[in-house]
Image (tube, rainbow, N blue to C red):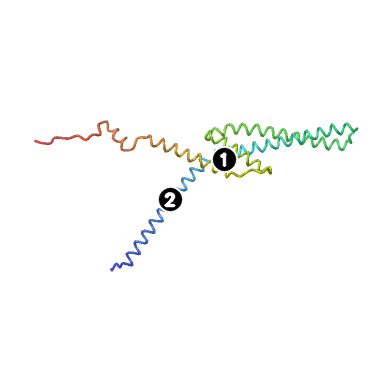
Amino acid sequence: MYITKTSTARIFQQTLQTSRQKADAAVVEVNDSENEASNDFGMPYKQVYGLDIKLKSSQRYLKSTQKDLESMKQQDHEMSLYGPVLDETKALRTKREDVLTKQVDTYTKDIKDTEDSLRTAVKNIDAGAAAEISELADKDVARMFGEKVVDDGVTIDAIIAKYYKKHQAGQNAMLSLLPSTATAHDSGRGGSSVPHNVDCTV
């Protein structure tokens, strides 16, 4: 069998391609592992963000509902000054006030429950992140209610990435303080790592 330059080049190219595929697969595997670790790290942060959004939204709904209820009561008072109110009108307004009162009770309970959950959830994230997430939630809820908010580019994913990087740096710093394998192996022998000179002369 004759091996030509062409066949040699082809074999080399196939080997190189296989090596590249293995390298790419290894990179993908590392990236997938890194993404999974990042996602796991970010879950508590997203939970805090979600609770913050729910809390701030409920607070706004409560304030709006309370305002509507107070307005209706004020109208009832003003209407009574002009004489008797029709039973049908009174019944409709009473029904509406009952609905608003129940909504106030519901929002009040939701707020208390969410505050309790939030106090527990923030214990699972970096202390500095809680304030940043709260500020982000304020802006996002304001947008939800149609308010104009300047977009500073901050997102929950950006906050998670920031604190994940900080977490990794802390982990690496801790690992750097651990003794190396070689040092641990030498110290485990129970003797000196300095080589001994043995006299073998007769």
Mark closest to the chain's N terminus, 1 or 2: 2
* Nearer the observer, 201 or 76: 76
- Label 2 sits on what residue type? Val
Please give the label number shown on residue 135: none
In this picture, residue 96 sits left or right of residue 112:
right
Q: Position of residue 73 (x, y in %)?
A: 81, 32
Q: Quadrant of the C terminus?
A: top left
Q: Position of residue 85 (x, y in %)?
A: 89, 34
Please, what secondary structure does the residue beneath circle 1 have?
helix
- Label 1 sits on what residue type? Lys
- Residue lying furthest left in this view? 202
Kindly report the distance in space between the C-alpha atoms of the residues bearing marks 1 and 2. Answer: 27 Å
Q: Which residue is mark 1?
A: 46
In this picture, residue 14 sits left or right of residue 56:
left
Res 192 → quadrant: top left
Residue found at x 33% / y 38%: 181
Q: Which residue is mark 2?
A: 27
Please, what secondary structure does the residue beneath circle 2 have?
helix
In this picture, residue 189 sits left or right of residue 102:
left
Q: Position of residue 128 (x, y in %)?
A: 53, 34
